[in-house]
Amino acid sequence: MANPSLLTDWVARQGQRWLDLWLMGLVFGGRPGESPLVITNCEIDGARVHLTFDHDERLTVVGASGFLTADGGLTIPRADEVRFGWYYYGRPQSAENWSETRYVRDGERVSITTTGPSAKWRPPSEVQLDKQPMVRLT
């Protein structure tokens, strides 16, 4: 994995800072500031990065191309796979209320699938990477 210390140093500097999570150019929660996240844990396991957030949301990045920390944010331009999971907001935190969106890269195409109660709002799709990074925290 490219420059893991850059990631861990950046996470340590965030403290209790609220962050917006952007996946494939779209902010989680609809609009910036609507679903802010605070990182509570960062683990690196070989080629996998696991970030846990304050309401038990989980971001897993497999095979990251690297980590960029310009302008105070974190950017992961490319990865083999990105998974983001969360409990459906407003419902009890239980297995049946867990949603997860998975982004799998094949060259410059990314297939996107969502499971759980949020799947009805997020139909499977495939997008071109173009210039947007796969993951951005701002």
Image (cartoon, grey):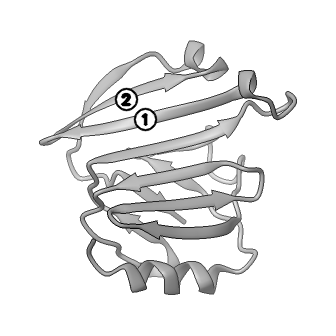
Q: Position of residue 118 (x, y in %)?
A: 62, 22
Q: Position of residue 15 (x, y in %)?
A: 71, 80
Q: Nearer the viewer, residue 95 or 57?
A: 95
Q: Is residue 18 left or right of residue 43?
A: right
24 above or below 121? Answer: below
Q: Is residue 35 left or right of residue 126?
A: right
Q: Is residue 15 left or right of residue 61?
A: right
Q: Are marks 1 and 2 in contact (CB under 8 Å)?
A: yes
Q: Which residue is mark 2?
A: 112
Q: Position of residue 30 (x, y in %)?
A: 61, 38
Question: Helix, strand, or loop for circle 2?
Answer: strand
Few, some or many C-alpha atoms within 10 Å of disc 2 (few <14, some 14-19, many ≥20)? some
88 above or below 96? Answer: below
Q: Residue at x 60, y 57 (%)?
A: 20
User: Furthest-top residue in view?
Assistant: 120
90 above or below 75? Answer: above
Q: Residue at x 31, y 81 (%)?
A: 3
Q: Residue at x 64, y 63 (%)?
A: 19
Callout 1 amino acid: Arg
Q: Which residue is mark 1?
A: 102
